[in-house]
Amino acid sequence: MSYTLRVLLLIAALATAGWILYKIRKLKVKMEDAIFWIIFAGILCVLGIFPEFTYWLTEKMGVMSPANLIFLVIIFLLLEKVFTLSIIVSQLEEKITVLSAEVALRSHDAARRLKEGEQASGETEKATDESELR
């Protein structure tokens, strides 16, 4: 593994960890997402700091070069994150559909009650007007 790739991995890992820690301090990221990105940065650090481990893992997995293994690991982790986010988005879309239906039913029910209330008050006013005329 080239020295340039190792340095780039370390810079990417430190930038990711720093960015996530900044977002955690500002309370702009959920803890489970932060944990994923911290682990991601840790894996990049391990692969950058210990090239022997990368070479060993490359041989065991039958990958052609350590750089390919690193790209494979990064792609796998990011695909896992996209899949997890896709599941969360699907669940949120279902919740939005249910909540929209509930709001529509409640507003329809409120409009119906208001209309019935106006009709009842109109009938009461008519009855009051008629009694005053007599």
Image (cartoon, helix red, strand yellow):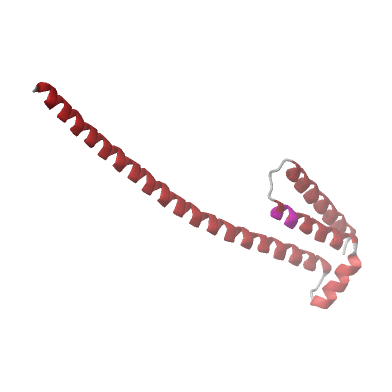
| Count of number-bearing discs | 0
Q: In which quadrant of the rendered image does the N terminus lie?
A: bottom right
In the depicted structure, whether residue 19 falls above or below residue 70 = above
- Seen from the viewer's position, the closer of residues 3 and 125 is 125
For this view, does 58 lie left or right of residue 95? right
Q: Residue furthest left?
A: 134
Residue 5 at what x, y percent from top left?
Answer: 84, 58
For the point 73% across and 44% down, the residue is: 23
Residue 79 at what x, y percent from top left?
Answer: 66, 63
Quarter-of-image position of residue 127: top left
Quarter-of-image position of residue 116: top left
Query: Which stretch is magenta?
Result: 32-36
- Seen from the viewer's position, the closer of residues 105 and 113 is 113
Magenta span includes 35: yes
State whether the magenta stretch is mostly helix, strand or loop.
helix
For the point 91% across and 68% down, the residue is: 52
For the point 84% across and 76% down, the residue is: 59
- Seen from the viewer's position, the closer of residues 98 and 83 is 98
For this view, does 29 lie left or right of residue 48? left
For the point 45% across and 54% down, the residue is: 98
In the depicted structure, whether residue 107 falls above or below residue 35 = above
For this view, does 47 lie left or right of residue 84? right
Residue 19 at what x, y percent from top left?
Answer: 76, 46
Q: Residue furthest top?
A: 133
Magenta span includes 118: no
Q: In which quadrant of the rendered image does the C terminus lie?
A: top left
